[in-house]
Image (tube, rainbow, N blue to C red):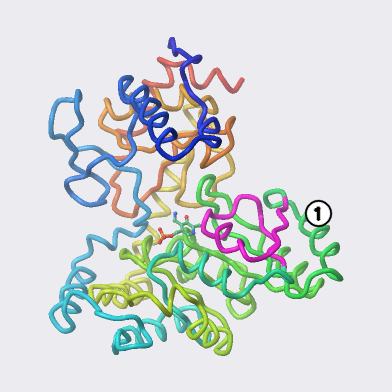
Amino acid sequence: LNFDKASFKDFENIEGMGVYERSAFFAEYLDYLRKRGHLNYRMESMSGCGPEVEMNIAGLGGKKKYVSLVSNDYLGFTQHELVKKAAIEGIMRFGTGAGASPAIGGHFSFHEMLEKKIAGFFGRDAAITYTTGYTANSASLLCLLKKEDMAILDMSVHASVFEGCMNTNIKLFLHNNMDALERALKESKATHRTRIVVVDGVYSQDGDLAPLDMIIELTRHYGAYLMVDDAHGIGVLGRTGRGLIEEHNLLDKVDIISGTFSKTFGHVGGYVVASAELIQFLKYQSRQHLFSVTASPASMSILKAIDLIDEEPEWQDLLWENIIYFQKGLKDLGLDIGTTASGIVPVKIRDIPMTLEVGRLLLKAGVYANPIMYPAVSKKDSRIRMSLMATHTRPHLDKVLNAFSDISAKLRLGSRYQ
Ligand code: PMP
């Protein structure tokens, strides 16, 4: 590899520029990547987000099928016939849009059912839905925490959580470090009014898990509240697919559960589940809920997807067979998959140009997987990030493992860790 590192521009330089200057600089940067075949942002799939997708990538031989590892549709429900049928039924009954925000006519019978169903899924009292999982986090926190309060955040929580804390004080603690969490809780006890600890269940870039048993104990001990975003745990973890919170037997104890309908539930939207009073407060006070249109009737598919988690548990079993097989295969190749314990599988490359090159070679070999780098992860932690699905077959996974084997030999990836 002979990368021209000098012209590999750093994003941070754009901060001091005006918007047009910044756009021009950025265009140059993207051009640099594009010319080297290293720009795979917004790649166009012509066939949805299944385990195999059709794409037409310039320079790679026209329209072709690629094994895809980019979707968070863990159980394959976006392609499930009953889920698709439920979406169509929703549209046929209610039309294609809801027409108004919830307070002024946009709240239909299925929206009410959806709130009850997702609250019931966790065995809890009440839920509010939002347009996306991102908004569920950002909007609810914006509404709940003010300048007298404090959000105590694991430093690896999702970007949406950070956005939700713009009205309040933020204390970050080192990822999954319980001493650091305890220190933050102890120090803020006398100084801040309401303190909410926010963690992900499954972390979206490393696929590792939060030690929820210890987190809840500390949170309770120091009189704070706990919010868990288990976007990547639902349908994947827990005896009945209720996620990491179920795995720790904490479904009735975590104060606020947030999540998304866009991953295992195969649609779009987000939810917050909590006590009836807190949810009622959000329904009247949370601006992004109050002043924004409700979910499209196609979201009736979510009702079916929630049922399928109980009715067809075999999808979760199939997913785990794939996770175990694939993670072992990568480790056998000497690759570093970090501390994942979920359907998210990173292969850590660490160096940014090398990560981009691995992404390019994977595409060449018919494998679609995302190179992830700064600012999504720290500068020295670039990786290829993959998500597994229940609907990946052994031949799909073998194709990916073979590609990694070839690329690893070519770029001597394994030896980089020794
Ligand atoms: N939380 C986590 C942990 C996520 O990974 C994501 C999706 N990247 C979100 C929230 C946002 O969900 P959505 O895509 O539905 O907005």
In the drawing, does residue 119 fall left or right of residue 199? left
Q: Which residue is mark 1?
A: 179
Point 26% across, 77% down: residue: 300
* Up-down relation of residue 31 to residue 373 (above or below): above
Given residues 34 and 90, the one toward you in this image is: 34
In the drawing, does residue 40 fall left or right of residue 350? left
Quick check: is the Cβ at mark 1 less than 8 Å away from ligand 1?
no
In the drawing, does residue 163 fall left or right of residue 80? right
Residue 5, horizontal then vertical, whole percent: 49, 15
Point 38% across, 21% down: residue: 407
Point 66% across, 55% down: residue: 154
Given residues 53 and 315, the one toward you in this image is: 53
Q: Quadrant of ligand 1?
A: bottom left
Point 58% across, 57% down: residue: 162
Q: Secondary structure at mark 1?
A: helix
Which contiguous range is marked in magenta?
150-173
Q: Classify mark 1: residues with Cα within 10 Å, few (<14), some (14-19) or many (20+).
A: few
* Up-down relation of residue 231 to residue 379 (above or below): below
Is residue 163 located in the magenta-colored stretch of the structure? yes
* Quadrant containing the N terminus in the rendered view: top left
Residue 211, horizontal then vertical, whole percent: 67, 59
Residue 252, horizontal then vertical, whole percent: 60, 80
Question: How many numbered discs, if any?
Answer: 1
* Quadrant containing the C terminus in the rendered view: top right
Residue 49, horizontal then vertical, whole percent: 26, 51
* Up-down relation of residue 292 to residue 63 (above or below): below
- The kind of residue tagged 1 is Asp
